Amino acid sequence: MAIYKSEIECASHSYIRAIQSARLIKMVENAYKNVSFYKKKFDEIGLAPADIKSIDDIEKLPFTTKTDLRDNYPFGMFAVPQRELVRIHASSGTTGKQTVVGYTKHDIEIWAECAARAITGAGGTKSDIIHIAYGYGLFTGGLGLHYGAEHMGATALPVSTGNTSRQIKLFLDFGSNILCCTPSYAMFIGETIREMGIDPKSLRLRAGILGAEPWTENMRKEIENLLEIKAYDIYGLSEIAGPGVSFDCETQNGMHINEDYFYPEVIDPETLEPLPYGEYGELVFTCIGKEALPLIRYRTRDICALISEKCGCGRTTIRMTKPRGRSDDMLIIRGVNVFPSQVEHVLLELGMTPNYFIVVDRKNNLDSMEVQVEINSSMFSDTVAGLESTKKRIEAALQSTLNVHASVKLLEPGSLPRSEGKAKRVNDLRKLQ
Ligand code: DLL
C-alpha cells in the first residue's frame, strides 16, 4: 500500500534522530523565550536552553501536565500572540476546566499532513470519499481528518456525528469509501445497517479510521464483520494534535507515531523514569514541530508500550500499542486495578456483544462492581436456566482475568444507550458519595 511521505516514514533511525534533535533545540528556545511558565520551570531547575544539544538530552527537560494547561487557561501556554493563531480547539472539559489549544498556519499544515499519512495508512487515496462522522467543533476529530483528507486531495465529506439514518443514506447515495468515527459509533452504524436489512457488501465502504477512545482487538473483529470493512485505529489528543499523532497501517500491529513531529517516551507514572521499549507505562509526548503550543514532555495519562521492531509495511517509525486506557480511567476495585478495556476483552471472548456498562459502588465500605451487558439476539430465546449459566460463565471469566469479583446483569438487546461520539462505559457511584 502507498506511504504518504516515505522519505520520512521509511527513513533511517539516524536521519529521524537528526531531525528530532534540530527541532527539539528550536522548540526549547521558543518555549523558554515565549512561554513564561517554561522560563520559570527551567530557571527553577537551573536548566538553560543551550543545555539541550540533541534529542539525547530530552530527559533533562521537565514534564508538563494537564493541570499546567488548566492553570494557564486559556492562552497562557501559547508561544505566539493571538493574531498568529489560525485556529483554536478545546477539550470537552467534562473532568474540570477545559484545556485550550491553538494552532498557527504552520501547525495546521503539519497536523493536516499527519492526518493524511494516517488516511494513506488505511489505504485511502486521492480517489476516495472520506466520510467524516467525528464531531466538528471544538473537538479535534472532525476538522482534523477533514484537513487530512483535503491535504492529500481526497474528497472530504463533512457529515459530523449523529443522524445515523442520514449517514447510511449518504453511504448509499454518494458511495463513501472510508468511514471516520469512534469505534462505538461504527458499531452502532453497523447494527443499524443490519437492522435496515442492507447488505454491507452492497456499499462502497472498505475501511474505517476509528479512534478517540480505547477499543480492543475483539471489538475490531466485531466492527470488521458487521460493516464488512477493515478497521484501522487512529490516536491523538487535543493537547498534542488531534487525530494523526499515530495510526495503524495495513498490518494493524501497533500504531505508527509521526515521530518527526511528536517525540514519544513511556515512563513509570510513579517514579517518572523512562521505561525501555516494550514495557507498559504512561505515554509522554514532546511537540517538537509546533509553534503555537510547544509542549514539553506532556504526560498523556494513556497507558501503552512503544514497539521498535521493524514493521512489515515498510515504515520505520516507532509504533505504540493500542492504549489500554487512561491511568485516570483505571478503576481501583478493592485495591485491584481494573481497566474497562479488560472487561470488554472478556465479554467479546465469550461471544457477548460489545454493548456493556460498568457500575461501581461502595456499600458498607466494600466496593462492588456490576457489569451490565446486552445478550445477543440469538440468546434471546434461551431458557432462564440457559441465561443463568451464561451469567455464571461471564462472572467466572471476569474473576479470572480481573482478579476481583464482578456481578453480571444480562440485558435485552438494544437496551443500553448507544454513543455517537466517545462511549461512556462507567458510572462510579463512589465518586458521588
Ligand atoms: O480524541 C483526538 C482524536 C479524534 C483521536 C479522533 C482519534 C480520532 P481528545 O478528545 O483530547 O482527543 O481525547 C484524547 O482520547 O488521551 C486517549 O485517552 C483517548 N484516545 C484517543 N485516541 C485513542 C485510541 C481525541 N485510538 C484522549 N485508542 C487520549 C485509545 C484513544 N484511546
Image (tube, helix red, strand yellow):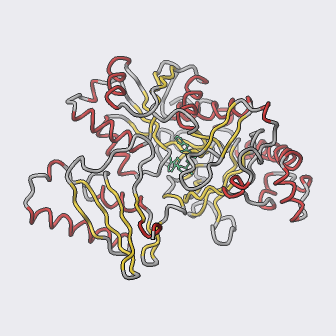
Residue 339: quadrant of the picture: bottom left
Horizontal arrangement in the rendering, residue 247 relative to residue 177 (left or right): right
Which quarter of the rendered picture does the C terminus lie within? bottom left
Query: Residue at (53%, 52%) from the top-left corner?
Result: 94
Q: Quadrant of residue 261?
A: top right
* In the displayed structure image, the side of residue 391 where residue 45 appears, left or right: right
Query: Residue 318: x, y in percent?
Result: 62, 48
In the displayed structure, 186 sits above or below 409; it is above
Viewer-nearest residue: 74 or 374 = 74
Residue in the picture at 41% in, 43% down? 183
- In the image, 191 versus 20, the foreground residue is 191
Q: Residue at x 64, y 41 (%)?
A: 241
Q: Position of residue 215 (x, y in %)?
A: 43, 51
The relative height of residue 408 versus residue 199 in the rendered view (above or below) is: below
Residue name at image x 67 percent, y 72 percent: 271
Q: Is residue 153 left or right of residue 413?
A: right
Lateral position of residue 154 relative to residue 367, left or right: right
Question: Whole-percent x and y of residue 196?
Answer: 22, 30
